[in-house]
Image (cartoon, rainbow, N blue to C red):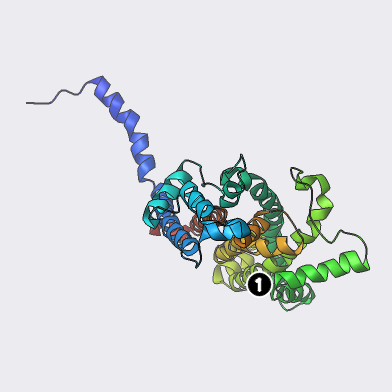
């Protein structure tokens, strides 16, 4: 007996077809797998962070209270902070709190009986300051890496290449504090052009005095550009020697089109991971740079929290940096797949 198919059923099938196709799209599946792997990575990292900050010798309450540490006050702070509970229970309480946007309470604030004890409230300002510093650097880093690396590759072993590669090699090999100190000496002590520190009043935006951001940004750029420029240069040199590039030139295709359509895109794919690593460096090296220039960002926040043994602040800052690292890796993998056509079938 034949089955009757109504118009409503056909319309329903048609309405669900685009959703099914979108779910089955290779990019969607690939991104889903990478996001799932990122979540697992963050979970593993969170375990290491929590264990590392809670197995240090000494009682946290005793360290925080200092000279005011009495058995009664230590016991009271342990109860308020939950230090009297088993570590695994405290870990799950911490993770559930993070999922709800709560990074816990500051042990120092609780010990001082301050009204505001939430770590989340203390994170906003330094995190925003670091994002401004890192964002400005990233906006300059990516185009400069591509431009300088491409020029060095196009003019390999000639004057433009030497002018670009030599400083990139030198500054890329110097530690952040050396580069920062050198820039302070040049631009403050010798030229008297820029301030030696980047501090500003609490609640004030770093953008109110952009001049104070110049030296930290130059320091981060000087260290981060080295590896990226060399990688793009190497990719350009290798790609320019490929047969399809030579064939395009023999067919009379304009040199500009050869460079941008046939060379640059294929040369960028191996460089994406290096650029991603440099972007990650901005949120790791920024800790040292902020200390050198007295910049009130997440780096200074971590240093102060470690000195005060405020474990909740250290854990919050560490998990945020780990999340940024993971997101940059996922974005880099996705960009590589978009740039390399062969990989599009591999992720299917």
Residue 232 shows up from this direction:
yes
Residue count near mark 1 (Cα–Cα under 10 Å), binned few <14, some 14–19, many ≥20: many
Up-down relation of residue 155 to residue 21 (above or below): below
Residue labelled with disc 1: 230
Residue furthest to the bottom: 157
Report the front residue among 334 and 71. Answer: 71
Whole-percent x and y of residue 54? Answer: 47, 61
x 77%, y 67%: residue: 180
Split into 4 quadrants, where in the image is the C terminus? bottom left
Split into 4 quadrants, where in the image is the N terminus? top left
x 87%, y 69%: residue: 186
Up-down relation of residue 33 to residue 187 (above or below): above
Report the front residue among 1 and 128. Answer: 128
Report the front residue among 206 and 11. Answer: 206
Residue furthest to the top: 7
Whole-percent x and y of residue 112? Answer: 62, 48
| Local secondary structure at mark 1 | helix
Residue furthest to the right: 191
Give the total number of marks visible in the rendering. Answer: 1
Residue 258 shows up from this direction:
no
Whole-percent x and y of residue 295? Answer: 74, 56
Residue furthest to the left: 1
Q: Quadrant of residue 236?
A: bottom right
Whole-percent x and y of residue 173? Answer: 69, 76
Up-down relation of residue 2 to residue 210 (above or below): above
């Amino acid at each position: 007996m034949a089955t009757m198919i109504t118009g409503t059923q056909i319309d329903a099938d048609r309405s669900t077809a685009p959703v099914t196709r979108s779910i089955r799209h290779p990019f969607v599946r690939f991104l889903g797998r990478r996001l799932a792997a990122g979540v697992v990575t963050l979970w593993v990292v969170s375990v290491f962070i929590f264990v590392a900050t809670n197995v240090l010798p000494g009682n946290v309450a005793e360290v925080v209270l200092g000279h005011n540490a009495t058995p009664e006050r230590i016991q009271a702070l342990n109860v308020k902070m939950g230090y009297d509970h088993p570590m695994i229970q405290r870990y799950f309480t911490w993770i559930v709190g993070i999922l709800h946007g709560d990074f816990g309470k500051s042990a120092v604030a609780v010990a001082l009986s301050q009204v505001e004890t939430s770590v989340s409230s203390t994170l906003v300002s330094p995190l925003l300051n670091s994002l401004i510093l890192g964002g400005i650097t990233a906006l300059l880093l990516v185009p400069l890496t591509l431009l300088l690396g491409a020029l060095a590759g196009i003019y390999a072993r000639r004057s433009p290449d030497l002018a670009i590669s030599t400083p990139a090699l030198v500054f890329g090999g110097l530690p952040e504090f050396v580069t920062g100190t050198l820039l302070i000496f040049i631009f403050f002590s010798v030229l008297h052009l820029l301030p030696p520190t980047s501090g500003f009043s609490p609640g004030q935006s770093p953008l109110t005095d952009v001049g104070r951001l110049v030296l930290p940004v130059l320091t981060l750029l000087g260290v981060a550009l080295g590896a990226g420029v060399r990688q793009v240069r190497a990719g350009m040199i290798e790609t320019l020697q490929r047969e399809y590039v030579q064939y395009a030139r023999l067919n009379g295709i304009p040199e500009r089109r050869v460079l941008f359509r046939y060379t640059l895109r294929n040369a960028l794919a191996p460089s994406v991971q290096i650029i991603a690593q440099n972007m990650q460096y901005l949120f790791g090296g920024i800790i040292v740079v902020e200390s050198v220039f007295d910049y009130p960002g997440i780096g200074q926040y971590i240093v102060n929290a470690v000195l005060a043994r405020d474990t909740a602040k250290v854990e919050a800052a560490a998990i945020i940096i780990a999340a940024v690292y993971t997101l940059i890796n996922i974005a880099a993998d996705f960009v590589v797949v978009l740039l390399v056509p062969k990989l599009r079938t591999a992720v299917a």
